[in-house]
Structure formats: C-alpha cells, structure tokens
C-alpha cells in the first residue's frame, strides 16, 4: 500500500502524491526542497524522505527474500483449518491474502478517530501557534465541522483546506 505525502513550504502547499511523485517534485526544486515540511497524510505526522534517488539493491543471498516474515501462532477452529487446507497456496498464503484485502478495505476510508488524529498532528505543526488553533482542535474532536471552519477561517487557505481534508472522515 503506497502512502500519500503532502509537502508545504511555510504556508504554501507544494505537492501531494505518492512518495515517488513527491520525491520527483522535491528533487526538481533542488536545494530549496531542504526547507520544506513533508507530511504523511494517513497519520498527519511529519516525515523525511531520501531525495538522492533510488538506493542500489545489494545482491541477495540464498533462500527466501527478506520480507520480514514472522512466525506466530494462530488459533482457529477445526472448520477454519479445514477450509484453509482447501485453498490454493495453503493456509499462509490465504491468510496473508485475507489480511491484505482487509487492510485495503480499511485503508480506503480512515476511521473517524484516525482522521481526527491525523488532522491534529498536521495542525499542531502547521497551525499550533495561530489564532483559533485550540478552538479548532476542540471542534475537531467534538466532530463539529462548523466550529472547526469558524476557528480556522483566518488561517492560510492551504493549511485550513488540508487540515479539513485530513479530518473529513471525522466530520462524517
């Protein structure tokens, strides 16, 4: 699952897109890109990315690729194990496929709490010292769209709009 990033230069929105798109935009900006703030839209947290381009892959050793696979115990009823045994690829492949499908479905629309937290993290960095910040955060967690819009009305448009977009699932 690719993450969506958004870049800001002060109060100005610069770019939004997947990591490769944003990297290309920032790389084209040259040294000016060093002063930008970059946010992961799923969490609202500030992130850093390597602008040097793709890192060459070292040759892999023998055996399975390093996927970070962890062996853990799963407790299922006998009927679940019976069904898994009939699936192509076996139990592990089927379980991974089911988990990825569930993650994709859940990732399509964030939960209200996840949206609130993402907007909070973003707004703390970008608007934490602005008039109306505390009122906007209280309205955000109260799911009060009108209160949020009123408290953030005097903010720069890019910050206000991106904060509202991150919070959209919270306002329902």
Image (spheres, helix red, strand yellow):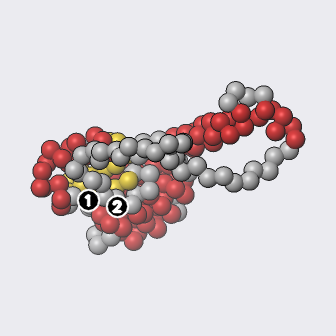
- Most foreground residue, 158 or 94: 94
Pointer 1 residue:
37
- Is any atom of residue 36 visible in this view? yes
Q: Position of residue 24 (x, y in %)?
A: 22, 42
The alpha-carbon separation of the residues under discs 1 and 2 comes to 7 Å
* Residue 30: percent from left, percent from top: 12, 50
> Quick check: 128 above or below 91?
below
* Disc 1 secondary structure class: strand
Q: Quadrant of residue 136?
A: bottom left
Res. 102 visible in picture? no
Q: Which mark is residue 46?
A: 2
Secondary structure beneath dot 2 equals loop
Residue 60 position (above or below residue 37):
above
Q: Are marks 1 and 2 in contact (CB under 8 Å)?
A: yes
Crowding at dot 2, Cα within 10 Å, few <14 / some 14-19 / many 20+, comes out as: some
The residue at the point 52 percent across, 46 percent down is 67
The residue lying toward the viewer, choosing from 41 and 78, is 78
Which residue shows up at 34% across the image and 61% down it?
Answer: 46
The relative height of residue 7 versus residue 59 in the rendered view (above or below) is: below
Residue occupying the far front of the picture? 62
Which sits earlier in the primary sequence, circle 1 or circle 2?
A: 1
Q: Position of residue 48 (x, y in %)?
A: 31, 58
Q: Residues within 10 Å of mark 1 (few under 14, many from 20)?
A: some
């Amino acid at each position: 699952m690719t993450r969506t990033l958004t870049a800001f230069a002060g109060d100005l929105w610069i770019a939004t897109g997947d990591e490769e798109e944003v990297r290309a935009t920032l790389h084209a900006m040259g040294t000016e890109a060093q002063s930008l703030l970059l946010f992961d839209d799923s969490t609202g947290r500030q992130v850093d990315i390597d602008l040097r381009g793709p890192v060459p892959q070292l040759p892999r050793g023998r055996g399975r690729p390093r996927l970070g696979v962890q062996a853990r115990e799963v407790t299922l009823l006998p009927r679940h194990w019976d069904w898994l045994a009939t699936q192509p690829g076996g139990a592990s492949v089927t379980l991974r496929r089911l988990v990825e499908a569930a993650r994709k479905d859940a990732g399509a629309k964030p939960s209200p709490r996840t949206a609130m937290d993402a907007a909070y993290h973003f707004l703390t960095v970008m608007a934490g010292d602005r008039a109306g910040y505390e009122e906007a955060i209280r309205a955000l967690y109260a799911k009060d769209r009108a209160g949020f819009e009123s408290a953030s009305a005097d903010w720069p448009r890019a910050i206000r709009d991106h904060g509202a977009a991150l919070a959209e699932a919270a306002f329902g």
